[in-house]
Image: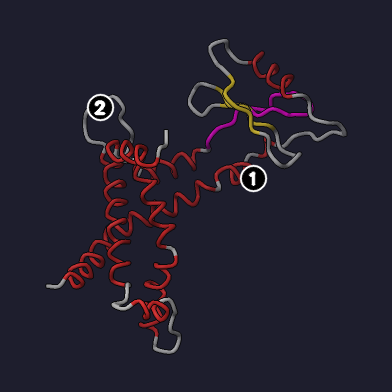
Amino acid sequence: MTARKLFRKLHLWLSLPFGLIIMTTCLTGALLVFEKEITALVQHESVASVPDQEPLPLSVLLERVAEKTPDSVEITSITIPTSPHRAYNVGLSKPRRAGVLIDPYTGKIIGPSGRLAFFTTVRELHRWLLDSMKPDSEGIFWGRVIVGTSTLLFVFILLTGLFLWWPKKLKGVGKRLKISLRQGRQRLFYDLHAVGGVYVFVLLLAMAMTGLTWSFEWYRTGFYKVFGAE
């Protein structure tokens, strides 16, 4: 069996089972990108009063929050929305991802802020396939392992796909970058897959290789050493 035939079989049969996991990871990741915007739409209590005056100074707003929180809780951040109709989000040190919404014009604390239950589920599905995280357990964290292994194999699928697409002669690259519309439905679907895959190859590879840093400690350590990240 030639290398091309071997890679073709691996590319096909690995894509079927692991492609479903990767698709789930991609769709949930896309949802998480718009978490702030979607949360702002559904959290009606985050609407500010917007009187005919400038917002209060940040120091005053932070002092108002500090007055309402225990001494053991620190203010970690403050998020100022682009819309003047939205309350400011003040992050707190604990519990994890805790915060409060404060009206920037009156200094009134509107209520708690935080991740919606829906996005908590989406994040767990994205990172661990809904497997619960067990920090004190010495067992295998299967959700993270499955997502990480699927992502690692996705890198292999991408590379084999590029290998199968690559023409034997460089002068044939131009033809391989075009989608045929006149050779039947089967050829159209093939071109959409192959040509479309080439156009987004770098983006998909970057997402997969950076995503692996959350799955394997050995990979994260090596990745940060290579790219000089902290």
Give the residue at mark 1.
Answer: 41
Which residue is under mark 2?
A: 137
- Magenta-highlighted residues: 101-115
Q: Position of residue 112 (x, y in %)?
A: 60, 28
Picture quadrant of residue 172: bottom left
Q: Secondary structure at mark 2?
A: loop
The three-letter amino acid code for the residue at tag 1 is Leu
Counting the numbered discs, the total is 2
192 or 51: nearer the viewer: 192
Q: What coloring was used for the rendering?
A: secondary structure
Give the residue displayed 38% in from the left and 72% down from the top.
193
Q: Quadrant of residue 20?
A: bottom left
Name the quarter where the N terminus is drawn.
bottom left
Q: Is residue 189 above or below residue 51?
A: below
Measure how far apart labels 1 and 2 are at the Cα level. Answer: 38 Å
Work out which residue is located at the far right of the displayed protein and give it.
52
Q: Is residue 79 above or below residue 143?
A: above
Circle on res. 223: none
Q: In the visual, does 107 lie left or right of 77?
A: right
User: What residue is drawn where x is 27% and y is 43%?
Assistant: 145
Q: Amino acid at mark 2?
A: Ser
**Could you say whether the residue bearing mark 1 is in a helix, strand or loop?**
helix
**Relative to 169, residue 129 above or below:** above
